[in-house]
Image (tube, helix red, strand yellow):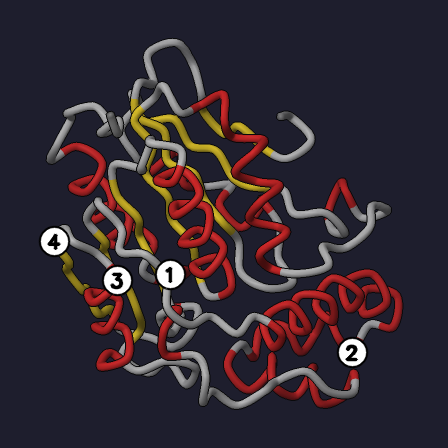
Amino acid sequence: MEQWVRRYRDDDGCRTKLICFPPAGAGASTFRTWAQGLPADIGVLAIRYPGREDRINEPMPSRLEALADDIADVLGGLMGHRLVLFGHSMGASVAHEVALRFQELGHPPAAVCVSGRQPTHTLADRPMIYGTDEEIIGHIVSFDASRAEIFEDEGLREIVLPAIRADYRLVDEYAGGSRPLLDCPVYGYTGDEDSQVTPEQMRRWGELTRGDFRLRVFPGGHFYLRAEEAPLLADVTRVLTEDKSPTTTAP
């Protein structure tokens, strides 16, 4: 499991565990500060995708569904715990797919938190984003100007681009479509100036669960969660602590 999971906090007192799924091109370090902003009895584990950070020499995933298969298999040993999944952008789709696999095994998560991503069943008409390196870089900088400096450094550019290319292809080739309804609450988060998804699109995540749905809109763009980390984690804390009942097990 350690190959796939970075444990920012996970001691014996952490009965509830937050599993975090990074966005395209990013790694587990996206969530490196989250343990500091969440209660001490909440485990904080971030998924380590292949092909980046300390897994940079490993093959990239072939399909988003295959990535979800691998993650669900690896996390199988945690199903006895109360799990909440949080995914941003591409990570929201991965988290949703992993949640469906847990549910099929009779262990749905306690909740799924999705951020900055169109819901699975509305992806058919989305614009494709994979292209040349310059087109990909232009797309990223259009909603995350802070990355421009990285791409201007030739050495850094060659380090980060392979994972970004691979993830953009995963996102484009992921058709989404109809999926079984989740048996747990879904919580949506987005920025009010996000160029990649609107609050109206985010609200449609509520159509993918038999449980409750709630959307929280923060100030900011696609990476609102950087500047709004404290209020975001305050809301996630409510999700993590408002219902401490164990996950449901199918008969």
Amino acid type of the residue tagged 3 in the rendering: Leu
Q: CA distance from mark 3 to mark 4?
A: 10 Å
Which residue lies under the disc numbered 3?
Answer: 208
Of the residues tagged 2 and 3, which is closer to the observer?
3
Q: CA distance from mark 2 to mark 3?
A: 41 Å
Which residue lies under the disc numbered 2?
Answer: 152
- In the displayed structure, does residue 32 sit left or right of residue 186? right
The residue at the point 21 percent across, 56 percent down is 209
Task: Tell me the element at label 2.
Answer: helix
Tell me where residue 243 appears, x and y as whole percent.
12, 32
Choose the circle earlier in sequence order: 2 or 3.
2
Of the residues tagged 1 and 4, which is closer to the observer?
4
Q: Which mark is residue 200?
A: none
Residue 40, above or below 18: above
Choose the circle earlier in sequence order: 3 or 1.
3
Which residue lies under the disc numbered 4?
Answer: 212
Q: Which quadrant holds the C terminus? A: top left
Task: Tell me the element at label 4.
Answer: loop
